[in-house]
C-alpha cells in the first residue's frame, strides 16, 4: 500500500479546496429547514460551487452518481441521492456531504443538521458522532497508528451504546477522491499503518442508534441501516503536520 506524502505546496492547494468545501456547509445552513427538498439543497450547493467558487462538485458523475452532493436523512447512513420527492420534515436529521475539486485537489467534509425540533435521542446521536470525530482528530500526529484512530472512535461510540458502521470508511485524498490508506472507524490500539507528516486523509465515522448492519437500496447508492434506526456521520479532511494535525475543512464555528 503506497501512501503519498504531500509537499508544503500540495498542502497549500488542499487547504484551499478544504476551505471551499467547508464554506459550502456554512453557506447552506440557513436553507436546511422544514419543507425544503434535498434536491433544492443540491441545486443551491451546486450553483454556489460552480458559479461563486468556480469549484467542481466531485460527486457529480463520480462512478455514475447523479448529483453534486450527498443528502442522507434519518436512517440513511451515507450516499443519499438528492430528490425533489424527499422533503425535510420537523424532527429529521440530515447529513450533507460536500466534496469540491479546486486546482486539481479535493476537499471532502460533512456535517449533521437537525430540522426544526429534533428529539433528544437524535440530538444525542448527532453530538456523540461529532465528538467521536473530534476525539480521533485529537490524536492525529506523526507516530499515531491507524488502529489507534479506529479504536478511539469505536470505544467512544460503544461506551455510548451506539454501533459503528464497518462497510464504509475514511480514505486518503489529494488529486484523487479516494486513495489509500483506508481509515477504519474501529480497531485495536498499536496496530496498523503509522502516520507520517504530509499524509492527507479523511475521518468520517458513521454511528448507528441500533445495529451496525447496512443495506444498499435498489438505486445502487443509498446506504441505510438494516434495522431502520437512525444513523449520523461527520467528516473532515486532515493533513498530518510535523507535530500534530491541520483540519483542512474546518468551519468558522469550530475551534481546532
Ligand atoms: N463524499 C463521500 C465520502 O466521504 C463520497 C461520496 S461518493 C458519491 O467519501 F458518489 F456518492 F458522491
Ligand atoms: Co470522504
Ligand atoms: Co464525504
Image (tube, rainbow, N blue to C red):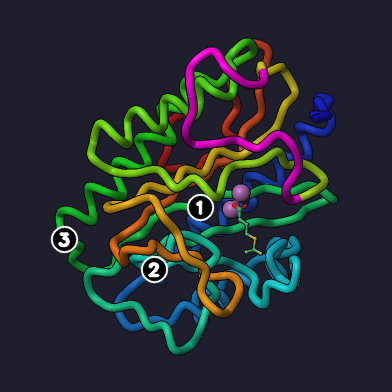
* x, y percent for residue 52: 68, 66
Residue 198: x %, y % from top left: 75, 23
Q: Position of residue 137 (x, y in %)?
A: 49, 28
Which residue occupies the foreground of this view, 14 or 208? 208
Q: At 27% from the left edge and 49% from the top edge, which residue is drawn?
A: 125
Question: Is residue 77 shown in magenta?
Answer: no
Disc 3: CA contacts within 10 A as few (<14), some (14-19) or many (>=20): few
Q: Which residue is mark 2?
A: 73
Q: Work out how far the residue at label 3 is from the one at label 2, CA to CA, in angstroms.
A: 14 Å
Q: Is residue 58 above or below residue 151?
A: below
Give the residue drawn at x 44%, y 47%. 165
Q: Is residue 10 above or below residue 95?
A: above
- Would residue 248 be visible to someone looking at this image? no
**Labels 2, 1: front one:** 2
Which residue in the structure is indicated by mark 1? 110
Residue 236 quadrant = top right
Q: Residue at x 30, y 40 (%)?
A: 128
Q: Which residues are magenta?
A: 177-193
Magenta part, dominant SS: loop
Residue at 39% across, 55% down: 112
Q: Which residue is mark 3?
A: 119
From the top left corner, tell me how far across and down residue 197 is, in percent. Answer: 72, 17
Lower position in the chain sequence, tag 2 or tag 1? 2
Q: CB of residue at label 1: within 8 Å of ligand 3?
A: yes
Amino acid at each position: 500500500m503506497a501512501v503519498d506524502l504531500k509537499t508544503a505546496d500540495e498542502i497549500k492547494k488542499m487547504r484551499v479546496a478544504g476551505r471551499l468545501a467547508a464554506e459550502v456547509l456554512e453557506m447552506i445552513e440557513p436553507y436546511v429547514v422544514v419543507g425544503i427538498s434535498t434536491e433544492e439543497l443540491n441545486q443551491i450547493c451546486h450553483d454556489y460551487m460552480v458559479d461563486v467558487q468556480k469549484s467542481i462538485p466531485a460527486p457529480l458523475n463520480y462512478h455514475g452518481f447523479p448529483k453534486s452532493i450527498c443528502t442522507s436523512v434519518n436512517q440513511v447512513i451515507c450516499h443519499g441521492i438528492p430528490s425533489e420527492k424527499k422533503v425535510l420534515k420537523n424532527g429529521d436529521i440530515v447529513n450533507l456531504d460536500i466534496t469540491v475539486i479546486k486546482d486539481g485537489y479535493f476537499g471532502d467534509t460533512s456535517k449533521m443538521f437537525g430540522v426544526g425540533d429534533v428529539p433528544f435521542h437524535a440530538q444525542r446521536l448527532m453530538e456523540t458522532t461529532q465528538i467521536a470525530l473530534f476525539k480521533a482528530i485529537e490524536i492525529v500526529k506523526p507516530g499515531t497508528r491507524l488502529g489507534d484512530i479506529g479504536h478511539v472512535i469505536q470505544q467512544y461510540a460503544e461506551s455510548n451504546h451506539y454501533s459503528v458502521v464497518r462497510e464504509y470508511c475514511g480514505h486518503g485524498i489529494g488529486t484523487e477522491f479516494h486513495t489509500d490508506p483506508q481509515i477504519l472507524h474501529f480497531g485495536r490500539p498499536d496496530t496498523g499503518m503509522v502516520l507520517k507528516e504530509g499524509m492527507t486523509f479523511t475521518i468520517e465515522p458513521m454511528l448507528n442508534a441500533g445495529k451496525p448492519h447496512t443495506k444498499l437500496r435498489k438505486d445502487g447508492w443509498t446506504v441505510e441501516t438494516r434495522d431502520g434506526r437512525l444513523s449520523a456521520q461527520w467528516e473532515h479532511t486532515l493533513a498530518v503536520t510535523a507535530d500534530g494535525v491541520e483540519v483542512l475543512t474546518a468551519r468558522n464555528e469550530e475551534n481546532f
